[in-house]
Amino acid sequence: NAGVTQTPKFQVLKTGQSMTLQCAQDMNHEYMSWYRQDPGMGLRLIHYSVGAGITDQGEVPNGYNVSRSTTEDFPLRLLSAAPSQTSVYFCASSPTTGVSGPLHFGNGTRLTVT
Amino acid sequence: EDQVTQSPEALRLQEGESSSLNCSYTVSGLRGLFWYRQDPGKGPEFLFTLYSAGEEKEKERLKATLTKKESFLHITAPKPEDSATYLCAVRETSGSRLTFGEGTQLTVNP
């Protein structure tokens, strides 16, 4: 099993550019989520999904869009990148709705916006 | 607002020197407290879940304990391969979101 796979591993964008961070899991998990990790801030939840066709906002959703058309994939879209979005982004999944189960994380995408 | 505070921010130990990491939390009702390990350039890896005060979990040289206000991650006779950042997270009873602490960066020197 590959677990949670994130692509790309590294990305540099200019302010105003758009891009999609990809996340795929092969564990048939219903719950998927996106976090960003910044120095001194801890992991913060951006968006999450409890199943295909269902998404909801987390703690820091502004500037990001998500969709969940399949159980396996949960892409994160930056419509107009800003320097404040420079961060390391982690996708995570869980076999439950995320309420009681542990999260399985991917290895992250390091994004720099100049 | 849920708060999770981890201390110390960084800890250096000699191989074999046991110590503890602290995670103090403020939630209206605890549904679960989670410990994760994160290696440089990797995503967090799940270690333990604790649900109620008095509960303890062990895995190799690690032992996690829980009280009503804090959790400890005890590391007994650590080895260099235990070097990592250890993250604590809590989930309250009324929500589905995890609140993470900033982590403790542990370095174990040979």
Image (cartoon, coloured by chain):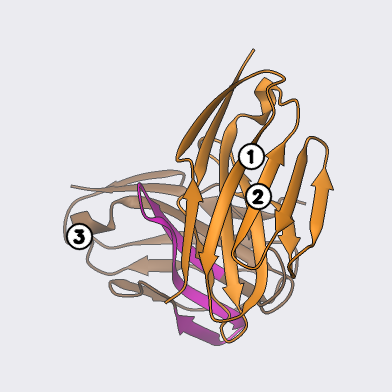
Q: Which residue is mark 2?
A: B72
Q: In the rendering, what colour is chain B?
A: orange
Q: Are marks 3 and 1 in contact (CB under 8 Å)?
A: no
Q: Label 3: few (<14), some or many (≥20) within 10 Å?
A: some
Q: Which residue is mark 3?
A: A82
Tag 2 secondary structure: strand
In the rendered image, which quarter is residue A93 located in?
Answer: bottom right
Q: Chain of mark 1?
A: B
Tag 1 secondary structure: strand
In the rendered image, which quarter is residue A51 located in?
Answer: bottom right
- Image x and y of residue A20, in percent: 39, 62
Residue A56 falls inside the magenta stretch: yes
| Residue nearest the observer in this picture, B71 or B47 | B71
- The amino acid type of the residue labelled 2 equals Phe
Q: Which residue is mark 1?
A: B20
Q: Is residue B86 above or below residue B78?
A: below
> Is residue A89 left or right of B107 when viewed as pictured?
left
Q: Are marks 2 and 1 in contact (CB under 8 Å)?
A: yes
> Is residue A8 left or right of A33 when viewed as pictured?
left
Q: Which chain is brown?
A: A
| Residue nearest the observer in this picture, A100 or B24 | B24
